Image: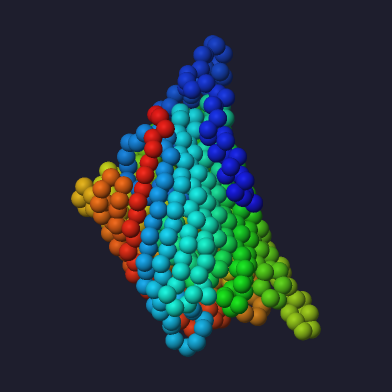
Amino acid sequence: MIRLHNVCLALLVMIATPVWPQTDSMQPTGNARETTAATVDHPEDRMQTPPPVTGQNFPTGFASEERSSYLRFGVVFTPAYTDNVLPGVGTSPISDMSYSVGPTVAFEKHTQRMNGTVTYAPGFTIYQKTSSRNEADQNALLNFSYRLSPHVTFNVQDTFQKTSNAFNQPNFAPGSVISGGAQVPNFSVIAPIASQLNNSANVGLTYQFALNGMIGASGTFTNLHYPDPSQVPGLFDSASQGGSAFYSFRVSRMHYLGALYQYQRLLSYPSAGLTETQTHAVMLFYTLFPSAHFSLSLFGGPQYSITAQPPIAPLSLPLPTAKAWTPAAGASLNWQGRLTALTFSYAHVIAGGAGLVGAVHLDSGTAMIGRQLARTLSGSLGVAYTNNRVVAVGLPGITNGHSILGSASLQQQLGQHLSVQLGYTRIHQTYQNVSVISLAPNTNREFISLSYQFSRPLGR
């Protein structure tokens, strides 16, 4: 699992002078194969990596031209009212005011061969009445890609979060973080106010071996841990590891076709014992790239799963291994305009259980639209729907259910560094055997955030 020391390592790489020269030209030698490789080296000839195989999140901001490198500092103060701060306690929801302070430091560096961002954002939250849930949060993000050679690109993305309040995670609002990948982390079962640690990482390598041909491989890792199980009755720790390999062919400047093989190992740790599901999938995909700020993708194919289940207590009766063929499919769209941003994704796959007793058949759809309403005023709307159906059969505590999230916000820039945001978020969840959710399935939150941000350009 990629941890914070990897963030520090990537930061050193970003600061260091690149080993490869900053020019993008290669001298052709006359050899036919080398001449073909040289043509690939021109920026306009480089292939893009299709969203179904990147494992990376879509950018959801507006298209803009900025300086290449920044050092950013900021602090956010957020008073919020939540009508369900202690789900699973008592027969009626308990409401409370919370006050959060979140400093942020981020380093961005962009060159012809490298794009990198490292962000660290601790947070501190206190509650007006339920002071037992006061806690310091930790958030770290690494997003880094580097062209090791004119035709080989390495990329890594890692998100680490330690929090007692799901709303305090950066970009929590539905639609703020959307992936078009065929293999995505599943954190859709939400215990709004509970201590948790989650880590999601993706590492990939791509090689454009011809003018219109690319291959690549990637690995993904996730971990979800609840330090205090008494806060989340009905939910359990989980983890996953996976790998994939793909071939992509550029039919024309805008059209890409390809094939993808994917493997997953999905682990859940319920009280009955370890539940493990392994999957193998072969999928075809198509991506349309009309411009650098627009993509539309489709993927689909068969997925085979093998689920090993723990014996049932108290007689330790063995449960049969469950094997099945199921379809996997998905679609995604991302558009970044000058004044409007639109992002959408849908996936029907086998994924990690997000705290349930095992891996799940996942149906997930997420959409976000953002709009620059005036020079200093912007707004966004987001919605997400997830249905989780546990793959395992016969285990005690199995529950299927769904989550619906919605959010709306307005942000007003008050000056060069100061801004204010008003927002509303609603969560509705239905999971009958998860008492932390079933006793109070709805959570509403209204907030106002005052943010101060300072950026220092570090050159072009």
Q: Residue furthest right?
A: 315
Q: Residue furthest left?
A: 374
Asked whether 451 or 251 is in front, the reply is: 451
- Please indicate whether residue 199 sits to the left or right of residue 101 in the image: right
* Residue 5: image location, x then y, percent: 62, 46
* Residue 119: image location, x then y, percent: 49, 47
- Please indicate whether residue 104 sits to the left or right of residue 417 in the image: right
Q: Is residue 70 above or below residue 424?
A: above
Q: Quadrant of the C terminus?
A: top left
Q: Residue furthest top?
A: 30
The answer to whether residue 276 is seen in the rendering is yes
Asked whether 361 or 24 is in front, the reply is: 24
* Residue 19: image location, x then y, percent: 57, 24
Q: Residue at x 43, y 49 (%)?
A: 58
Q: How many marks?
A: 0
Asked whether 238 or 7 is in front, the reply is: 7
Q: Residue furthest bottom?
A: 91
- Please indicate whether residue 206 sits to the left or right of residue 456 in the image: right
Q: Is residue 113 above or below residue 413?
A: above
Asked whether 238 or 13 is in front, the reply is: 13
The answer to whether residue 218 is seen in the rendering is no
Q: Residue at x 57, y 34 (%)?
A: 13
Q: Residue at x 35, y 51 (%)?
A: 452
Q: Is residue 106 above or below residue 188?
A: above
* Residue 425: image location, x then y, percent: 36, 68
- Which image quarter: residue 256? top left
Q: Residue at x 46, y 44 (%)?
A: 106
Q: Is residue 22 above or below residue 169?
A: above
